Image (tube, rainbow, N blue to C red):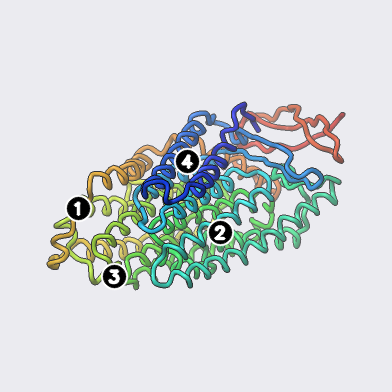
Amino acid sequence: MTATSFPYLTTLVLLPAVGAGVVALIPRKTVASWFHEAVGVAVTVLTLAVAAAVLFAFKSGTGAYQMVSTHVWATGLGIHWSVGIDGISLFLVVLTAVLFPLTMLGARVRRDPRSFVAWVLLLESACMGSFVSLDLILFFLFFELTLVPSYFLIGGWGYARRGYAAIKFFVYTFAGSAFLLVGIVSIAFIHKSQTGVLTFALPPLMHTHLSGTEGVLLFLAFTAAFAVKAPIFPFHTWSPDAYSESPTAAAILLVAVMAKLGTYGIIRFDLNLFPQASRTLAPVLLTLAVIGITYGALVACAQRDLKRLLAYSSLAQIGFIALGTFALNSQGLSGGVLQMVNHGLVIATLFILVGWIYERRKTWQIGSLKGLQSPAPVLAGVFTVAMLASIGVPGLNGFVGEFLILIGTFVAHRWWAVAATAGVVIAAVYLLWGYQQVFHGEPAEVDSTTRDLSLNERLIVAPLIVLIVLLGVFPKPVLDRITPSVNRLVVHVDTVTHTPIPAGLRERPLVAVKAPCMLNGVQVSCSVVDSASPGAPATTKGASK
């Protein structure tokens, strides 16, 4: 792990939170109605600037955590403010920083903008904290904090059934998180019984010895929370209602950012803490992933509501991410991480466009929308690019992630990969059908007067289209930073489960280095076996005062 003099990651977490407090404290009557929105956009842009600095300062070629910042938070309880970033979390942080200002600009609300902006900024702080936390209690607090602003955004600015959708979302995700808290406390006390040290930090907990039953039960406790948040079939039933009844901004952030907390949690915590259980239960999760891909695609075909069609499309894409994750090899995991970023960009673009269509036509019913391409050709063109990226057309970002996922799964679990390809074909069917119904055909009289994208709207969506094309044509800089951390994780899983490590992940010899660690509450100097190879695991060989 490498530390840094400037607390980049702490700033990423605290800046939106402070901004939310400032916005909430500015009275409505003393400023113009747009002032709170302007402050919110300024805070999110500053956060994006810090995230860009993190991306620039991040060193490629290493799988270790970087920019680590650790401070004792609760003395005696083993809880620390411990944040760090690696290739797996780097681009999820950048994705979050990119989407929040674009969402705030592209999905404005007319009613009570002060409260709306404050909740959005608090949600950004919670998402950032979840992606960079290296302490399990700290992660849990941020993971749970995301529920509060999300609930109020859905319930306060949603549509007809917003109350039902908000309660269903909160109850499902809160119930799943209860299992997560039990799992966190359990593994910490198992670790204490073995070492005499109570800690919730991820690196030492990775070396906790668990019996087969303990590992499986704790894996299920953690995964219950992550599968609901993602959501992974069959824990998805809250998502269609939440996505369709949410205001455009909340829908974008729920599906493009918050859903990634679930899949990220599986990669960061399940695979690191419970590698044996992950490999044992991989066939079950692969089966659920394939079912989710197929089910999401088939149900999307039956939708006549454009927003719900995108909700079920997202379920299928989350299935692909889970498929790559439990392939448990470098190609599948790298594809899964990349697809989290790709899906976030694509689905955010589609939901922004659907929100703009609703503003123009006051409906999401596909049967009431037709012929929009004639009066709004730019809108139709942008929708086409995002739709093709979601299908996985070569040259756009969706293809790269799906290709790596299917390759990695085919190498390790051939028949699951073959079954998953059916989802790719069905996705082309329902997305092309939806596009034809909305944009092709002879427009009705009211459709013929629908305005095209304004200059401001084009500027808002342009960065997303550029990233969709850029990651499809030249994904190498992203993969160069993702792959070393993925390799390190794959080697950890293979080492614990006694699986032969692929030659490409163990090219360089191991060397001994000195690093501080804790032994029975006393800081000692540990001889740690590490490697210049980013995939090599670190194992303690001995300690001396």
Circle 4: residue type? Val
Nearest to N terminus: mark 1 or mark 3 = 3
Which is closer to the viewer, label 4 or label 1? 1
The residue indicated by pointer 4 is 94
Q: Position of residue 51 (x, y in %)?
A: 49, 36
Which is closer to the viewer, label 2 or label 3? 2
Nearest to N terminus: mark 2 or mark 4 = 4
In three-dimensional space, the C-alpha distance between marks 1 and 3, rounded to whole angstroms, equals 19 Å
Circle 1: residue type? Asp
Circle 3: residue type? Gln
Q: Residues within 10 Å of mark 4 (few under 14, many from 20)?
A: many
In three-dimensional space, the C-alpha distance between marks 1 and 2, rounded to whole angstroms, equals 36 Å
In three-dimensional space, the C-alpha distance between marks 2 and 3, rounded to whole angstroms, equals 29 Å
Asked whether 22 or 191 is in front, the reply is 22
Q: Position of residue 254 (x, y in %)?
A: 47, 57
The residue indicated by pointer 2 is 147
Q: Which mark is residue 365?
A: 3
Nearest to N terminus: mark 1 or mark 2 = 2
The residue indicated by pointer 1 is 452
Image quadrant occupied by the N terminus: top right
Q: Which mark is residue 67?
A: none
Q: Secondary structure at mark 3?
A: loop
* Residue 207 seen anywhere in this rendered image of the structure: no
